[in-house]
Image (tube, rainbow, N blue to C red):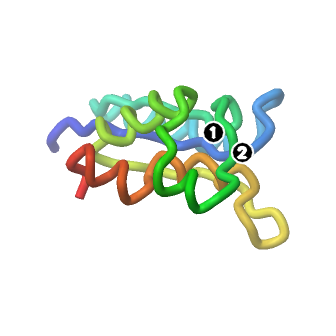
Amino acid sequence: MDRRRILILQGHPDASAPHLCHTLAAAYAEGARQAGHEVHIVEIARLDFPLLRSQQEWEHAALPAGLQAAQDEIAWAQHLLIVFPLWLGDMPALRGAPCRVCSMRVRVQNGMI
């Protein structure tokens, strides 16, 4: 089996205490490392970035510095695992960051598509 670069986006919104999502992400990372893969983890709740407030920002604003490292990690990864809780049928911490990090303009500029 080829060695893979794996990124885990851990999306629980509470970074102050371990939750099931943290445990699942850690167990996956441990298993992948034992299998010889390289694993990085990004905790969405620890990212510092402003929310999008307009279409103008979506189309023209620069990527906030707090998201640049996450974008670089996504570009680095060959395999992506997203772990998040469902609260009332929705993903609480995965609203702002992935929209900004994975915008079409950003993906095209970085050769991701």
Check whether the beta carbons of the residues at disc 1 and disc 2 lie within 8 A of each other.
yes
Residue found farthest to the left: 2
Q: Secondary structure at mark 1?
A: helix
Q: Quadrant of the C terminus?
A: bottom left
Which residue is painted at 33% across and 48% down in the image?
A: 79
Give the class, few, some or many, for how many residues have Cα within 10 Å of label 1's Cα (few <14, many ≥20).
Answer: many
Which residue is painted at 65% across and 35% down in the image?
A: 49
Q: Secondary structure at mark 2?
A: loop
Position of 65 with respect to 4 (left or right) is right
Question: Is residue 8 or residue 94 the one in the foreground?
Answer: 94
Q: Position of residue 40 (x, y in %)?
A: 43, 30
Q: Position of residue 91 (x, y in %)?
A: 70, 60
Residue type at mark 2 is His
Camera-nearest label, 1 or 2: 1
- The residue carrying mark 2 is 12
Which residue is painted at 31% across and 35% down in the image?
A: 35
Residue type at mark 1 is Ile
Q: Quadrant of the N terminus?
A: top left
Tell me the CA gap for discs 1 and 2.
7 Å
Disc nearer the start of the sequence (1/2) = 2
Q: Quadrant of residue 50?
A: top right
- The residue carrying mark 1 is 44
Q: Position of residue 46 (x, y in %)?
A: 68, 29
Q: How many marks?
A: 2
On screen, residue 83 above or below 22: below
